[in-house]
Image (spheres, grey):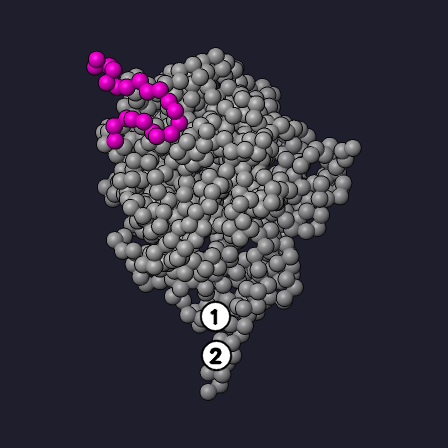
Amino acid sequence: MSRQLKFNIFRYNPQDPNSVPHTDSFWLDETPSLTLFIALNRLREEQDSSLNFDFACRMAICGSCGMVINGRPGLACRTLTSDLPGEITLMPLPVFKLVGDLAVDTGTWFRATNEKIESWIHTDQEFDPEALEERMENDLANSIFELERCIECGCCVASCGTANMRADFVGAFALNRVARFVMDPRDKRSDADYFEVVGTDQGIFGCMGLLACEDVCPRKIPLQDQLGILRRKMGFIGLKNLFRRKV
Amino acid sequence: MAYETFYSDLVCIGAGLAGERVAIEAAAAGFKTILLSLVPPRRSHSCAAEGGMQAALGNCAMGEGDSPDVHFADTVKGSDWGCDQEVARIFADTAPIAVREASHWGMPWNRVEAGKSMCFKGGVCFEVEDKAEKHGLITARAFGGTAKWRTCYTADGTGHTLLYTLDNKVTQLGITVHDRIEAVSLIHDGDRCVGCVARCLKTGKLRVYLSKATLIATGGYGKLYSETTNTVINEGGGHIVALDTGLVPFGNPEAVQFHPTGIVPTNILVTEGCRGDGGTLLDVNQERFMHIYEPEKAELASRDVVSRWMMHHIREGHGVPSPYGPHLWLDIRHLGEKHITTRLREVYDTCIHFLGVDPITQLIPVRPCHHYSMGGVRTNKDGYAYGLEGLFSAGESCCWDMHGFNRLGGNSLAETIVAGRHIGRAVADYLKGAETTLRTDLARQAVARDEERIKRIVSGADGKENVYDVRNAMQKEMMDNVGIFRNGTDLQKAVDNLRELLVRSKKVGLRSSGVGSSPELAMAIKISGMVRMAICVAYGALMRTESRGAHAREDYTARNDRDWLTRTLAYWRNPDADLPTLEYEPASPVFHLPPGDRGYGKCEIICREEMNE
């Protein structure tokens, strides 16, 4: 027998002076292979057309639909209701500015953070359209891709103790991104350059090691390893700097 | 009526790969550029391209002897001679440069590994040996309709990785991005486009962008169909604002591609790379069938051909019954765990999460579904839109027209950065000489008109039609009657029903207040534009009485080069009309490769020569 699902959904429209933050409840008959993508669209089309949420690719690769699902950040599009109890509570991701209901402004946050960590290849070399590409080992290309798989959904940031307390913390996503560039021989930045970017309390030393980021990452990126490697590397440079100053 | 105005040299409507690549070129030339996007740029549909992009590097063993000439010929054959051959030439020549440039910017392309390795074709294993001198260069995999292995890739996350690489470049150059912005109309004086009116999807407010050049790079119009691999934002927004001017034609609207392997029931794409890497299609008896229809190319014929044979095979009663209708199987089990969890990792994840199927040991249920829009805003070979000066288009939204009536797998991702590079330069050149009067009076009129329209929708002044009912009916109509196989009776039915839906679409009224970002209002603003687009597709298909590429008429099965070696140009000149005006132009100004047999997809051809006899 199919279940009747109860949805408790956070509601607030910051553009509407009459709106106050509250929770609305909706009921929906569960159908086979029901995902939160299908469920939320049905609720909007059939029950309340003012319901606001974000989806784009609906196949877990664009990162639009991060939300807090029964207390845990995750991608709504690939969450099957059959994996959840009959009562489902949906909240917007914390840390990011609310657009309305479950929709949050991740774009501004990620762009600003990517600027902060200078998320691009730093090189003096000009591109030569006549030349062959620089060679690279395939294993290295695969290792870079492993970290490049991050889709900036914001789940790691939303689940992060530090990011929830401190607005200036760059979050696991950014540290993983830096680790990706550290690994890439095309980026000519030295470890000391990276230290300037993330060797701070806003960067790697702000991480309290709670590691919810790795638990919730829908891409299963090895954040714990990358944070550890980066912390050791940056710690080493920090000590060197300290020593140098004393001399 | 207070609204904010933003001034720039170039405003790009759309910030996927094509839009960003154009913006990079313009910004690097010193022009102030603003990117507008429905979503943060990294969430654009470009990220969904999986398998790779074609470029004739010829590095891998199976790509040996490849060249832009071979790539050009494959592209023209793939298009069923519907493409502009000058454009296909520019494209094939530029693709290798674009790939290497992306590498220079940080793209982690997979690389050649010297030595022997085992590969599959049609389920049969064979050995390949890559040469030591090519070790470490960018490698490639097989895709459908290609003579060589030419598709460069990063596992099966090529679009994602490329998009991040380009967006990093955009960030580095400090190019302004306004995300959650939707263009509502173009601002023009009948000759020249000077920007657009747009709605902020955070606040709901209208704003104005005034610019010397305006680019449309909004991707495809897949959401005219109910069963599509496209993201929910591919609603043809850019096409609508262009068509609404009455001046800019919609090129080849009827050229719509169906991809062979959408998973059932969610229509999520599994990459052509599955078949390129040796995966096979099986029927209800778990037997291969494509080699019966296509002895040479088998599973790797072009997408239009494979999709048709699959539907044919299902119609013959060989489909696998399921609650969601009959489907076929995609089998990649023989590729093995390592291959599937590395080179086809997204496919693996998709199958596990959305199907509960482990593709290492189980078969994947697939069926053709809508995938790509070959048609679009008609431009010349440098991206200049027909009909309005200062308006450009690039990428899937554009019909410049390199795909004709069928696009080869791996040619769309390639197109985004190749066209972006080429058209970006054309835009920069244009801007060097361009002066324009940024007429605030035109902007004010446009905002007033859009504001009035929105007011009527919110208040329900014209009716209380439910926008979602209209959209769903349109999508169903397109799926049922303007699909893979088409015929006059069904197409006429579609046109008639869509004309009725157009009337209903103009009577849409909101159920909610429409205050703030209001997704219901966003849909309501564009619904009648979407229905007009759908009519263009259906009507274009009805009038084209031949079969060419993805346009397959059951009542006109031959490809007719005598009468139809043409491109459809659909104009919506009268806003109150319920049909577009169709005009035609030659498919290509030159035929370096004269129309002939594609080598796959059995099809009778009515030759041009017959006319002279």
In the foreground, A192 or B206: A192
Q: Main secondary structure of the magenta part?
A: loop
Q: Are marks 2 and 1 on the same chain?
A: yes
Any magenta on residue A206?
Answer: no
Q: Residue furthest right?
A: A1
Any magenta on residue B605?
Answer: yes
> Disc 1 on helix, strand or loop?
helix
In the foreground, B211 or A127: A127
Q: Residue at x 39, y 24 (%)?
A: B602
Residue B506 in the image, given as x and y percentages of width and height: 52, 20
Q: Is residue B308 visible?
A: yes
Label drawn at residue A241: 2
Range of magenta residues? B593-613
**B125 shown above or below B390:** below
Instruction: Specify which label sits upstream in the sequence, 2 or 1.
Output: 1
Label drawn at residue A195: 1
Disc tally is 2
